[in-house]
Image (cartoon, rainbow, N blue to C red):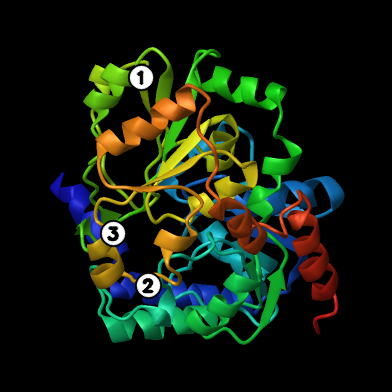
Amino acid sequence: MKIKTLLMKIKRSQYVKEMLKLLFYAAGKLPTHKKTIIFESFLGKQYSDSPKSIYEYIKKEYPDYKLYWSVDRKYLSNFQKNGYNYLIRFSLKWIYQMGTARYWVVNSRLPLWIPKPKHTIYIQTWHGTPLKKLGVDINEVHMPGTNTNSYKENFIYEASKWDYLVSPNAYSTEIFKRAFDFKQTIIESGYPRNDILYTDNNELKSKGIKNKLNILPDKKIILYAPTWRDDDYYSTGNYRFSLELDLNQLKVEFGDDFVILLRMHYLVAEQFDLSVYKNFVYDVSSYNDIGDLYLISDVLITDYSSVFFDYANLRRPILFFTYDIEKYRNKLRGFYFNIEEEAPGPLLKTTGEIISYLQLIRDDKYQLPLTFESFYNKYCYLEDGNASERVVNQFLEKGKLYIE
């Protein structure tokens, strides 16, 4: 154990970072691989999100391109079993391919020490329509390993490397420009990751996903997908989460009718013991793509996560479990709009309130609130199943015009 800890310290040391940075600079001086694209989703942990949708579109429409996934070594199984071309993050092969690739397609920030070669076109898809404040808009940062000024400076520095930033709607475009201090090209296209909510929203697809998860076809499905809390953590990048939703109450009331899919944020390190809820609660935090989980779910329960913007495309019930809304809004992050007035579903503070609404959903008596249509028209109006095509047409065709 001591040897493993020592090796981890060495890998994370400033000396190693500087060595990797020098190697990256050297790789960036080599001839460009004009038809090589590197994809990364959530720090190399998943084959998912908008990078996945863009990857699948390019693989189909541009088969002459060489495509690689940047992968965290601990999550190799997500890629090996499906036969994807992958590169282990920070390996020599990864540095070479990243340094010589024409394109990077990424949905979260890369480490600050990585220098972007002049020939590389960096497409940042980001990973959500913002409710909670982002980047320089955050008044006070409570995350470990940084302070407010450093966090904002680092965010702006990383964003300065992006050539393209994908936006799902005009509302997000305005915020992204300011919060990221972004001055390059925004592709306002809808989110590629939401294409499947239009192209794959059918019984055959849903049946296949349920079979993969061993869920009985007669069960209604609750997807519980909360976000993380900035001030509740084990260490930098590893966050705790307190499960305030009373699973015992839910099992007593709905054990015969529903199953719950528990989907934690990719930054949450919590491992829950769900053995007493076998065949009722499924931990799907490690399931690659949340889009599949949207398709099979009858209702979404969330809090301040951007998942509700995406799920609204399906026009299904959304319940907001906002037991700590005052603290989250007033201290931790702050919101861009009044969620009490605009939310496409009720804001609830107790498991009892959640149960009352789930009873309506079970009995097919739930009706979408009056706010739903205005919400959909403001945030989902660009989504139609073709966002991947629009994004690729923008960066791949225009990218060819870059000076070699």
Residue of label 1: 254
Mark number, residue 17? 2
Q: Residue at x 85, y 53 (%)?
A: 62
Nearer-N-terminus badge (2/3): 2
The amino acid beneath tag 2 is Lys
Residue of label 3: 325
Up-down: is 220 above or below 114? above
323 or 47: nearer the viewer: 323
Query: Which type of secondary structure does the marked residue at label 1 adopt?
Result: helix
Circle 3 Cα neighbour tier, 10 Å, few/some/many (<14 / 14–19 / ≥20): some
Up-down: is 299 above or below 130? above
Nearer-N-terminus badge (3/1): 1
- Whether residue 289 is visible to the viewer of this picture, yes or no, is no
Of badges 2 and 1, nearer the viewer stands: 1
Q: Position of residue 85 (x, y in %)?
A: 64, 45
The amino acid beneath tag 1 is Phe
Mark number, residue 174? none
Circle 1 Cα neighbour tier, 10 Å, few/some/many (<14 / 14–19 / ≥20): some
